[in-house]
Amino acid sequence: MSRFLSLLLLSFILISSCSSYVYADVIGALRFVVKNGSDEKPVSGVKIKLKDSANVRPDVVLTTDKDGVATVSQLDARSWQVTIATDNYEVDSRQVLVSADTVTDIEILLQPIKEKIIRVTGERKLVHTAETTASTHRDSTFIKTFPANADNKQSLSKVLRGNPGFVEDSVNQVHPRGEHSATSIFINGFELPGALQGRAGQIISAETVQSVDLLTGAYAPEYGGETAAILNVNLRSGTIKPFQDLTLQGGSFNTGFGSVTFGGQAGPPIEASEDQANVARRFGYLINLSGRQTDNALEPPQPDNQTAHNKGFSQILFGNFDYQAGMNDRFTLTANSTPAYTQIANRTGLPDSFAPFGQGYGYGGALSRVAAGALGVVSQQAGGQDINQRDANTFGVLNWRHTFNQNLFSLLSVASLHTGQYLTNNNPAVNLFALPGDNGIEFNPSLFRDGYHTEVQGSLTLIAGNHTFKAGLLDDEQSGKESYQFVPASQLALDQLAATDPRLAPVGTFQTDAFGNPILDNRGLQMYTPNPGATVPTLFANRSGFYRAAYLQDTWRANSFFTVNYGVRYDRYRQSQNLGQPTVDQSNLSPRVNMSFAVTPGSAFRLSYNRLFIQPPLAQGAILGLPIQPETLNQYEASYEFQVGRGQAIKLASYYKDIRHQIDTGLLFFGTQIGAFTSVNFDGGTVRGQELSWEYNPPNKVGISSYLGYSYSIAKPFGFDNTGTPVPMFNDHDQRHTLGVGLANTWESGANVGANFYYGSGVASSPLIDDNRIPHSELNLHFGTGPVLFKSGKEGVGFALDVENLFDDRQVINFNSGFSGTRFQQGRFILFSTEGHF
């Protein structure tokens, strides 16, 4: 065990024994202030009942003190139904959203009974003026209502698109605020280590999410690791009443999906109750098993033949188990495995309108159909290319929450994670000494990457008056193994291989003429000849290191007008390898200040400054040039959020990032799209943007709901990358305008209809000429009947129709992109579902 790990455990024990306090990332607190509505004097002795909207936790009953105040902590960060019924006052009932890491004040004005009892439904407060983060809240109801991931119910990344700050790209990428990825996922308060770029499978399934807060700025010091965006995920748990969900879906492109989710509770009751059928019990369980297959797995390299070697298979094996050992201790075990198998899509040729730019023939797809015919070069599909990718993402997390008292609790987490990516091929055999000049098949790749993480995290939090103090430590021990072999299938590919890194090429010599001048191929690279008997080597890379962090923060609600979250975070990253590159060992001290000003009871103006440290990806480090350095940046943000009516809120935000050592991910061999990626460092970059969001949520989630998210941004790198190559003018994922709109209606019966629209003005890698970017848009529809067969209340069997990309748009997303090659929108999916809930 490392010295840091020992110090982490020792610190946790010492701080716990000193009665400090821990606050979990998916846990929040509520403070009720109950007054007489006629004279606004405090009302004491009022009973307040809170009911969990997810039907997982037991009911909570509070009683106001002499000042009319009642406080409760350790509430899961989601909606709770609050009911107040007391003598001489009308009944008050409302939905309250608990915000993570925040004490949310709820003022309730009780109306005295005059002639008859009238049930009052209080207005839900959408703007939490004491919240200092920049976030968007999404829950399982949103995921089911709006068809953002209509063609793939496993996909969480598709749920993100259209939200302010997120730009959709190909190959499962959603870019937050000008960064390539660098998104951290927190599950039930635990920071999950990152997975590999270019994966075709999922990390976690959208079906397992109870709610998620999408954070894009104004980060409290507790958030680190990869901070382009934070997904603070509250996972589904076993419900008080056991349930079973079954889904079968099928439709276009031979797409099929099946899912089984079941959960419940067992064991003795947590609290004594006469109603044994509706009492929370000590042991909870939730299992989700799903599988998906399709002939159109990823964005294809041509608009017409989208199923050419583009099959995909993915699975989700998920379990979330919790045990309430006593009133003060809760243990949670989360286990997740998401294997995937995906064919690398083949090029079949582009329409003749692409002839001046390359129709997808030859190396990198650079040849037109006519030029390829003259050289005898056929497409990848006709040439028999057969490259396949297998993904492995597996993790297990054990959490222990301990409550010392109403204002004191802790979280200790241990986890193990493995992420893997494996490229294999069944391509035609290659004779290194009789290579064709050009070929649609570039390489016969064999690439294996594995990353391993062992992680321990601990945090302590103390609520003391108007202060919420939190301290935490993290130790992530990392190791990675990689192997690379690329057998060139043409002279152009051999020249590219030798130019990229001679260690990847067979032993040989660069060709020169009689005067010693280099002989160049038609791509401008020096030609290379292998020595007799030479073979293509395998390059092995072994990496080891760690990422460690510590933070201290305070959220101080000075008064009803001003709240500030401030503190400091220390990050250290170290990685060494066997490639002869120098060891990376960097640390950074990051101050952060996030402020919220309550302009009115329903509006907030927020300002923030964050110093951020982003660790590089582990098993996808560069094998070329200098080793990848951590990214550091200063981020500034201002926003204004206000409630404009019942269930409606608007937010305006503006931000600026000043980045050093910006981390990007690109293709190992430019122009190919065989699934071989590598990380690069840019000297720096800047990102600036403005965002607008609007949401409308109906009472009790029945009726019309809607959302809108718009972003304008400019993402520009500068300087050189870590191989000494000048950087492009814009990041390849830079996009000026991004719009997401959703509209839905839900009936009491459970039937619903929904639509969402996504528009992107074109990423910087989309143009065929200069910076003439190609926009793309997508309209998705969902129709659900709710339960109609074997119906009993909200249980039964129902049917659904989902249409993704209604107008069958197949625009260019990327053309010769440095990250994903050439990619087009996937065509229209029409999918029918049978859904059962019991």
Image (spheres, rainbow, N blue to C red):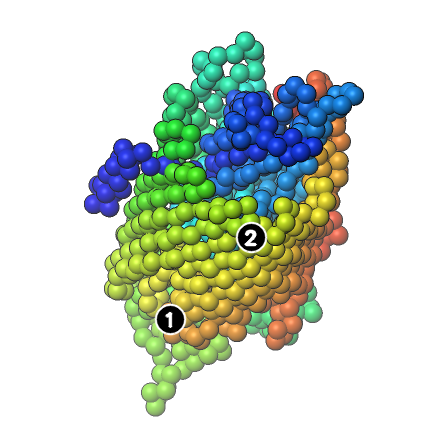
Q: Residues within 10 Å of mark 2 (few under 14, many from 20)?
A: many
Left or right placement of residue 656 versus residue 684 in this view: right
Image location (x, y in percent) of residue 103? 50, 39
Q: Residue at x 35, y 63 (%)?
A: 629
Image location (x, y in percent) of residue 48? 58, 25
Quadrant including the C terminus: top right
| Secondary structure found at label 1 | loop
Query: What's the residue type where badge 2 is placed?
Result: Phe
Residue 261 found in image quarter: top right
The answer to whether any part of residue 533 appears in the image is no
| Secondary structure found at label 2 | strand
Image location (x, y in percent) of residue 392? 43, 43
Q: Residues within 10 Å of mark 1 (few under 14, many from 20)?
A: some
Residue toward you, 386 or 63: 63
Quadrant including the N terminus: top left
- From this view, report whether residue 263 is shown above or below residue 180: above
Residue 312 found in image quarter: top right
- From this view, report whether residue 32 is shown above or below residue 778: above
Query: What's the residue type where badge 1 is placed?
Result: Thr
Residue toward you, 669 or 46: 46
Residue toward you, 452 or 274: 274
Marks counted in the figure total 2
Q: Residue at x 46, y 32 (%)?
A: 74
Q: Give the farthest residue toward the top.
A: 274
Q: Nearer the viewer, mark 2 or mark 1?
A: 2
Left or right placement of residue 215 versus residue 745 in this view: left
Q: Which residue is mark 2?
A: 597
The answer to whether any part of residue 739 appears in the image is yes
Q: CA distance from mark 2 to mark 1?
A: 46 Å
- From this view, report whether residue 756 is shown above or below residue 179: above
Residue 457, labelled with which disc?
A: none
Q: Which residue is mark 1?
A: 723
